[in-house]
Image (cartoon, helix red, strand yellow):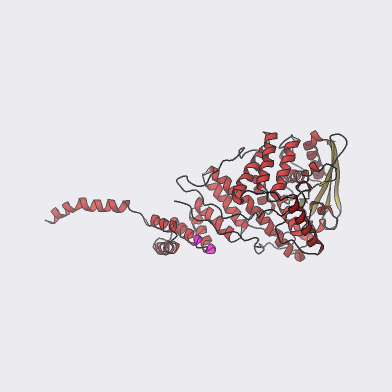
């Protein structure tokens, strides 16, 4: 009888097991709770699950996401770090760890883990979105470090700054052609890019220079002031400063000069001058760089020399538009920067750097929204207010930016504080994507240059120190304009 009963029940037992296996598992139930905003319930379930199965990465990740949604960022950081220890290829945890650090205003680590996410994920176009966010955060990081250097100014000791550090200040337009003003930043960017290829040098990033100028409330012309430059070099942590100028000669000729001075003593190490026809402008810049390197008695390897000789474009108008784009970006005008970079790319279809910069500016514009250039009246008002504050010894409280002469003087750009980062795409291939105008590859990608130079300038992105303090400890994080609330979790 028992055998008969067991035989009769077996199909029903099998059916029950089958139904059970088709039902939602604990991870799916928790995911649904998080999607419904029931984060406390999700945390309670994961707490119980981790007591029984402490080594399941998925449970730690889900609990971290729930904690993240509740804005318990310090706790979510711990969970996501544990997941990445168990599974170093977990891209979702890398993304949420980056977003958690961003919410904690730890820009160094936020950038590091956003970059790790991009290395791990296979969602190609979404990588561009994350790269744009990295670009914004890097500017915020430089702003925070500039403020931190100002706070620590009394502790800075120029004698402790490494003697291979060098900062290139903006080249001053001493000519009569205002349309060449964008070259003030364009030439500086070229020289920085070239000198960065010299392994024995540590070159201060141009964005760091820009943010320090903002903190000091300096215009471009103030940088060549003999009273201002040494202090700027000290705050930048630069042993040497390169200062230069350019002006047009008769016909289509142009003159570029530069000198290298020591921050502490003002002693000149290099004085050099290059002149020639405008069509040879890019070759002239290379000659200038090689003269600076030779006068500093630096021996180049064949690979370094070959890298420096690379020219992104030989179209002068294209480079002028690219330089204009740099200025717009510094002023937080990403819509206008995209237009300038696009004009550069149209003028020279082989100018891959302009294409990449246009794509990047467009992605940033999608994050911060469309930007509008201030009217002439607004610019004049902003400049007058800045001058009054400067005269009275006050520091501008708004995020005023020193524009080039072509930009109409000092203007107050829209806030570049990014809104919450979008959630990463889900495993089924969803997520936010957008087209990349002009592609994203080619020589000297602006985003890649910023990332690479940021990584090499301070040993590693996680060990930021203020040169000249004699300390290897990471200074306390300086909070700048508060970020908005962190993002919601991705769809699953």
Left or right of residue 318: residue 117: left
11 vs 198, left or right, is left
172 to 233, vertically: above or below: above
User: Residue drawn 54% across and 62% down?
Assistant: 73
Q: Residue furthest front?
A: 377
Q: What number of labels is visible?
A: 0
Q: Is residue 257 left or right of residue 345?
A: right
Q: Which residues are magenta?
A: 67-75
Question: Which of the pair 406/213 is nearer the observer?
Answer: 406
Image quadrant assignment for residue 383: bottom right
- Residue 483's quadrant in the figure? bottom right
Asked whether the viewer can see residue 164, the reply is no
Residue 281 is situated, as x and y percent measured from the top left of the image, at 79, 37
Q: Residue 22, percent across and down?
A: 32, 51
Residue 379: x, y in percent?
A: 75, 52
Can residue 74 be found in the magenta stretch? yes
Position in image of residue 446 (x %, y %)? 67, 44
Q: If the image is split into quadrants, where does the N terminus sit? A: bottom left
Q: Main secondary structure of the magenta part?
A: helix
User: In the displayed image of the protein, which residue is found farthest to the left?
Assistant: 1
Please state which of residues 334 and 241 is positioned toward the viewer in this rendering: 334
Frontmost residue, 261 versus 23: 23
Question: Does residue 225 appear anywhere in the picture?
Answer: yes
Q: Give me the residue at 71% from left, 62% from top.
A: 397
Q: Is residue 144 magenta?
A: no
- Residue farthest to the bottom? 154
């Amino acid at each position: 009888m028992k055998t008969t009963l067991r035989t009769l029940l077996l199909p029903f037992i099998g059916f029950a097991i089958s139904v059970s296996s088709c039902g939602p598992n604990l991870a799916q139930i928790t995911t649904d709770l998080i999607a419904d905003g029931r984060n406390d319930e999700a945390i309670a379930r994961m707490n119980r699950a981790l007591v029984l199965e402490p080594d399941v990465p998925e449970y730690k990740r889900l609990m971290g996401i729930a904690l993240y949604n509740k804005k318990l960022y310090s706790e979510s950081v711990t969970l996501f770090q544990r997941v990445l220890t168990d599974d170093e290829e977990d891209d979702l945890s890398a993304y949420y760890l980056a977003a958690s650090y961003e919410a904690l205003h730890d820009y160094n680590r936020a950038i590091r883990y956003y970059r790790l996410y991009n290395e791990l994920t296979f969602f190609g176009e979404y990588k561009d979105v994350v790269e744009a966010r990295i670009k914004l955060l890097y500017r915020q990081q430089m702003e925070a470090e500039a403020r931190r250097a100002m706070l620590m100014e009394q502790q800075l000791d120029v004698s402790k700054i490494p003697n291979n550090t060098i900062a290139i200040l903006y080249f001053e337009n001493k000519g009569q052609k205002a349309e060449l003003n964008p070259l003030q930043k364009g030439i500086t960017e070229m020289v920085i890019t070239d000198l960065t290829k010299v392994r024995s040098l540590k070159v201060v990033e141009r964005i760091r220079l820009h943010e320090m100028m903002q903190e000091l409330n300096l215009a471009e012309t103030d940088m060549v002031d003999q009273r201002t430059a040494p202090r700027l070099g000290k705050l930048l942590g630069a042993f040497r400063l390169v200062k230069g100028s350019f002006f047009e000669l008769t016909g289509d000729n142009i003159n570029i000069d530069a000198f290298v001075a020591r921050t502490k003593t003002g002693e000149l190490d290099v004085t050099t001058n290059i002149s020639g026809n405008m069509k040879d402008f890019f070759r002239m810049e290379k000659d200038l760089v090689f003269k600076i390197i030779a006068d500093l008695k630096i021996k180049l390897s064949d690979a370094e020399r070959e890298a420096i000789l690379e020219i992104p474009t030989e179209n002068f108008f294209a480079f002028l538009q690219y330089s204009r784009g740099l200025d717009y970006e510094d002023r937080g005008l990403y819509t206008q920067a995209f237009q300038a970079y696009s004009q550069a790319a149209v003028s020279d279809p082989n100018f891959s750097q302009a294409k990449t910069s246009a794509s990047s500016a467009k992605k940033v514009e999608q994050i911060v929204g469309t930007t509008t250039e201030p009217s002439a009246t607004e610019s004049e008002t902003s400049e007058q207010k800045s001058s009054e504050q400067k005269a009275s010894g006050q520091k501008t409280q708004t995020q005023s930016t020193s524009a080039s002469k072509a930009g109409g003087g000092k203007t107050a750009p829209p806030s570049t504080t990014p809104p919450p980062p979008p959630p990463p795409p889900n495993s089924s291939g969803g997520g936010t994507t957008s087209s990349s105008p002009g592609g994203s590859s080619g020589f000297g990608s602006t985003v890649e240059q910023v990332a690479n130079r940021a990584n090499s300038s301070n040993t590693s992105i996680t060990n930021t120190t203020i040169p000249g303090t004699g300390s290897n400890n990471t200074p306390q994080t300086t909070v700048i304009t508060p970020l908005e609330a962190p993002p919601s979790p991705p769809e699953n």
